Image (cartoon, rainbow, N blue to C red):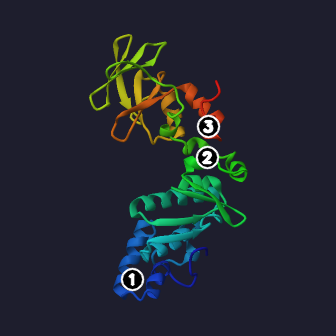
Amino acid sequence: NICSIPRRRVLSNITFGLEIQKKPKEYQRKKALEMLELVGLKEWSDSYPSELSGGMKQRIGLARALATEAKILLMDEPFSALDPLIRLRMQEELLKLQNKLKRTVFFVTHDLDEALRLGGRIAIMEEGGIVQVGSPEEIIINPRTEYVANFVKNADPSGVLTAAKMIDSATKASFVSSKRYLLDHKTNLTLELDEDSHPIRAYIENQPLLIKSYPNIGEGETNLILVPENTVLRDIMKAKVCCDFPLVVVSREKKFKGIITEKDILKTLLMKGKEKDLGSQNV
């Protein structure tokens, strides 16, 4: 009965925090039903926790915490007792709720992959003290101590590293003329920009090439693909599979930022660990 009070029905579990806050009964019920609907448990409001699965019980605790409208939530290894499949689902649920409700969550975990998946900022502790704080990308690329380096050395960078970070050390496009860049010497691939640096046309040997934006692409199509700068490595690799040309990285405002080649992807995978090492060796 993790995160639940066994003798209370699900709805009563959710109102528990509101009872402590001495909220009116009508408000308690209304708020609890809202939270149950939010976490997908509304139809089980009259059930007992023993009638629910482990993942559903976990949602009870989450709904109860959200019902109090606390601006800051502390979650101490909330998913550690769940099997891997349910754990992944709960992580996805938390990300959706966080995106909708915008609460600050202090999430304690010993699972680095979980921290990288959920955290906007990560604090790594050693012997009771914080040794590094940073974004998931910063933690992976530039560990500040040997302890942190050992802690993250086997982490999967594919869901953390972004196009914005990769183009810092990636292949550079060659400036040809005003608002025109040569992206690939072998195919004579060029990209034309408008006055605001937005990609507008692409050519191979002066023949027009269709420009598409990820993820609206199809495998095997002969197109130039634009990827937003916040695209993670996993999706960059998916896009590259569908394209024989360098990927064009654009900002949130759709402005040209740089290119990523197949070689750049391989370098990132091989040289993950120190930002200063990215791009310093040939592949």
> Residue 159, position in %: x, y?
55, 44
The kind of residue on which mark 1 rests is: Gln
Q: Identify the amino acid type marked 2.
A: Ile
- x, y (%) of residue 27? 35, 82
Instruction: Name the element at disc 3.
Output: helix
Residue at the location (36% across, 16% down)? 203
Residue type of the residue flagged with mark 3: Lys
Mark nearer the viewer, 3 or 1: 3
Q: Which numbered disc flags the more N-terminal residue, 3 or 2?
A: 2
Q: Which residue is mark 2?
A: 140
How far apart are the two marked residues, 3 and 1, measured between alpha carbons? 54 Å
Nearer to me, 184 or 21: 184
Query: In terms of secondary structure, where does tag 1 sit?
Result: helix
Marker disc for residue 28: 1
Closer to the observer: label 3 or label 2?
Answer: 3
Which residue position is annotated with label 3?
276
Q: Badge 3, how many Cα within 10 Å: few under 14, some, many 20+?
A: few
Callout 3–callout 1 Cβ contact below 8 Å? no
Question: Which residue is drawn at the image coordinates 43% and 13% (left, top)?
Answer: 188
Residue 249 x/y as whole percent: 43, 33
Circle 1 Cα neighbour tier, 10 Å, few/some/many (<14 / 14–19 / ≥20): many
Please state, as top left, top right, bottom left or bottom right, where the C terminus lies in the image. Answer: top right
Q: Which x, y percent locates residue 157?
A: 60, 43
Report how far apart the C-alphas of labels 3 and 2 lie in the structure.
12 Å
